[in-house]
Amino acid sequence: MWFISISYTMGHTLPLVVLMSVVGSFIWTFLEYCFHRFLFHIETKSYWANTFHYLIHGCHHKHPMDGLRLVIPPAEAAILAIMFWNLYGILFTVSTRPALFGGGLIGYVIYDMIHYYVHHGQPTKQSIKKLKKYHLNHHFRIQNKGFGITTTLWDRVFGTLPKTKADKKSG
């Protein structure tokens, strides 16, 4: 919220700051998909590459129900945040960067909460039940599809949405 408030104090209207924050969260969903698909599921061959992959994501796939391996450790998250803050400094203006970055941080926190909940929660809402089934399908059935965590949008856009068992039976 502090980052978002900076854009407001720099002269942007409240509706525009809210919009930029929402756009920042939307950008996060794309980054989440890209990280998961292109970094966390990268094909590795060497010992060190395999070790790196295991540390950043392979361990989570080997032990998907381990609650201690679901979120990025704080030190790693801080390093990534600094990198993205600097990247946003290149891509966006001085006054829009804080709201977009703050919205992305909110998106990241929502991602962490959803990811934890789809692994360990007992959802009662149909939409969250579907998200849980979709994500656990990625873990236990088709690991090369279903890279979104908070949304299926980017899997739909890029053709990586896994077919359900019902889809396979009908076609």
Image (spheres, helix red, strand yellow):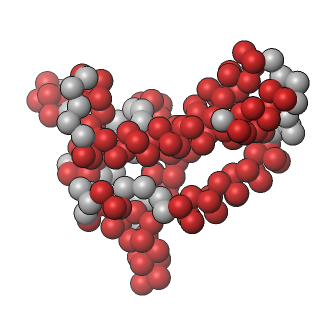
Name the side, left or right, on which 4 lies relative to 115. Answer: right
**Position above or below: 115 against 25:** below
Residue 143, given in percent of the width and then of the height, sits at: 29, 52
**Position above or below: 145 against 6:** below
Image quarter of residue 107? top right
Q: Residue furthest left?
A: 169
The N terminus lies in which quarter of the figure?
top right
Residue 6, given in percent of the width and then of the height, sits at: 79, 35
Q: Nearer the viewer, residue 86 or 73?
A: 73
Residue at the spot x=40%, y=63% of the render?
A: 57
**Can residue 96 be seen at all in this image of the molecule?**
no
Q: Nearer the viewer, residue 39 or 74?
A: 74
Residue at the spot x=27%, y=46% of the render?
A: 119
Residue at the spot x=47%, y=82% of the render?
A: 48
Name the side, left or right, on which 57 lies relative to 98. Answer: left
Residue at the spot x=83%, y=22% of the render?
A: 12
Q: Nearer the viewer, residue 146 or 58?
A: 58
Name the side, left or right, on which 170 lies relative to 55. Answer: left
Residue 19, given in percent of the width and then of the height, sits at: 68, 21
Q: Residue furthest bottom?
A: 47
**Position above or below: 119 against 110:** below
The C terminus lies in which quarter of the figure?
top left
Image quarter of residue 28? top right
Image quarter of residue 98? top right
- Total marks shown come to 0
Residue 86, given in percent of the width and then of the height, sits at: 77, 53
**Can residue 67 be seen at all in this image of the molecule?**
yes
